[in-house]
């Protein structure tokens, strides 16, 4: 379901995500020109773990809300600003008693889980006599003042907490990657210090050779360009490049048929480009760096194509992008991610401060 995947990526789209009744309009394919049309592999995309400590609670609340027809109808008419302002949360008062009862039980279970976490933490420090209710204040995804009832305040807090946390998801990934690169360089240099001069020169020479080998790869097409998409069309989809059609391409790669290309579906389009540069069998190719590059490609395409900045690409947005000059005549694409350069610069700045 579209709303499951999208909410877990970007909770601000809760209203849009719950409109799963709307399915993509089938696109007629001229079978005289395009043969052997088949969907890409993995016809079902499982929603990813958000990494939030309340991920399971978030999923369960949405599962229950989806069952209420009144709430779904209100969501169909709402926009993102109504979600952010908390206006839509007040519609919770009108859902069925059965749904409210389930939500109440979910909240009691979540409060119980948090209390157990608090107790385990306190026990580890042998700290006794702390007020669990007071400590619950640190969790901002539910109303701790009423641990037994799920109210509109709870829905509002859950949406705002997840929105805030997930908006920084990509930024956090970039920062973690830079730390990884800094630590990798630090460990390499520390290892060199343990070697004699001859061995150190050998290792440095090997390191430079590996860099050159890694940089010696086929041309990487600009992400989101016609050349890049045509390559996917030909090599992944097995279709004639002369018959490339943006509408058909969109349909083929809208894996869950919800009428949108979400972040996972976009990132899957870059696999062929990344395979030109990264091979898990090669010592010189770092798979962590590959995933950073995949993220950078996706961010770039989203910035160019996602007009309303909702982190989803509609067919209309996609087709508009194919009309731009950049689609036909893109700039060259450099694979050395800025995050790698920043990490190396930070390492040198950090090491220069060491005594």
Image (cartoon, rainbow, N blue to C red):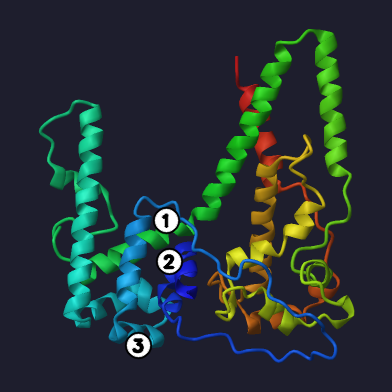
Closest to the camera, between mark 3 and mark 1, is: 3
Q: Pointers 3 and 1 in contact (CB under 8 A)?
A: no
Q: Could you tell which of marks 3 and 1 lies nearer the N-terminus? A: 3
Q: Could you tell which of marks 1 and 2 lies nearer the N-terminus? A: 2
Q: Position of residue 113 (x, y in %)?
A: 24, 49
Q: Quadrant of the C terminus?
A: top right
Image: 113 above or below 66? above
Q: Left or right of 145: which side holds 220?
A: right
Residue appearing at x 21%, y 69% in the figure: 102
Q: Could you tell which of marks 3 and 2 lies nearer the N-terminus? A: 2
Image: 124 above or below 23? above
Residue carrying label 1: 165
Badge 2 marks a residue whose secondary structure is helix
Residue appearing at x 18%, y 55% in the figure: 144
Q: CA distance from mark 3 to mark 1?
A: 27 Å
Q: Which of these two is toward me, 83 or 102?
A: 102
Residue appearing at x 82%, y 83% in the figure: 35
Residue carrying label 3: 73
Residue carrying label 2: 11
Q: CA distance from mark 1 to mark 2?
A: 9 Å
Residue appearing at x 20%, y 38% in the figure: 119
Q: Pointers 1 and 2 in contact (CB under 8 A)?
A: yes
Q: Left or right of 27: which side holds 75?
A: left
Q: Left or right of 201: which side holds 347?
A: left
Image: 85 above or below 74? above
Q: Residues within 10 Å of mark 1 (few under 14, many from 20)?
A: some
Q: CA distance from mark 3 to mark 2?
A: 19 Å
Q: Residues within 10 Å of mark 3 (few under 14, many from 20)?
A: few
Q: Position of residue 123 (x, y in %)?
A: 21, 30
């Amino acid at each position: 379901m579209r709303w499951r995947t999208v909410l877990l990526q970007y909770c601000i789209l809760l209203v849009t995500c719950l409109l799963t009744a709307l399915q993509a309009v089938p696109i007629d394919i001229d079978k005289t020109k395009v043969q052997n049309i088949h969907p890409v592999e993995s016809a079902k995309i499982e929603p990813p773990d958000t990494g939030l400590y309340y991920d399971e609670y978030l999923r369960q609340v949405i599962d229950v809300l989806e069952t209420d027809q009144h709430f779904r109808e209100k969501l169909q008419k709402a926009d993102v600003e109504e979600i952010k302002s908390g206006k839509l949360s007040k519609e919770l008062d009108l859902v069925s008693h059965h749904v409210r009862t389930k939500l109440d039980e979910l909240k009691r279970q979540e409060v119980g889980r948090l209390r157990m976490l608090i107790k385990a933490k306190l026990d580890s420090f042998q700290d006794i006599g702390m007020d669990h209710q007071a400590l619950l204040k640190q969790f901002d995804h539910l109303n701790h003042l009423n641990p037994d009832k799920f109210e509109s305040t709870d829905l509002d807090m859950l949406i705002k907490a997840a929105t805030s946390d997930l908006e920084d998801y990509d930024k956090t990934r970039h920062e973690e990657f830079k730390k990884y690169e800094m630590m990798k360089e630090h460990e390499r240099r520390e290892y060199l210090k343990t070697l004699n001069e001859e061995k150190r020169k050998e290792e440095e020479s090997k390191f430079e050779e590996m860099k050159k080998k890694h940089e010696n790869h086929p041309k990487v097409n600009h992400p989101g360009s016609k050349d890049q998409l045509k390559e996917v069309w030909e090599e992944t989809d097995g279709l004639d490049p002369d018959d490339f059609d943006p509408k058909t391409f969109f349909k083929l790669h809208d894996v869950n048929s919800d009428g949108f290309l979400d972040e996972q579906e976009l990132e899957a389009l870059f696999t062929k480009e990344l395979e030109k540069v990264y091979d898990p069998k090669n010592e010189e190719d770092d798979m962590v760096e590959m995933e950073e590059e995949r993220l950078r490609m996706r961010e770039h395409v989203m910035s160019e194509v996602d007009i309303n900045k909702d982190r989803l690409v509609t067919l209309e947005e996609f087709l508009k992008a194919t009309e731009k000059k950049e689609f036909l005549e893109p700039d060259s694409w450099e694979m050395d991610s800025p995050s790698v350069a920043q990490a190396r610069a930070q390492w040198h700045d950090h090491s220069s401060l060491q005594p």
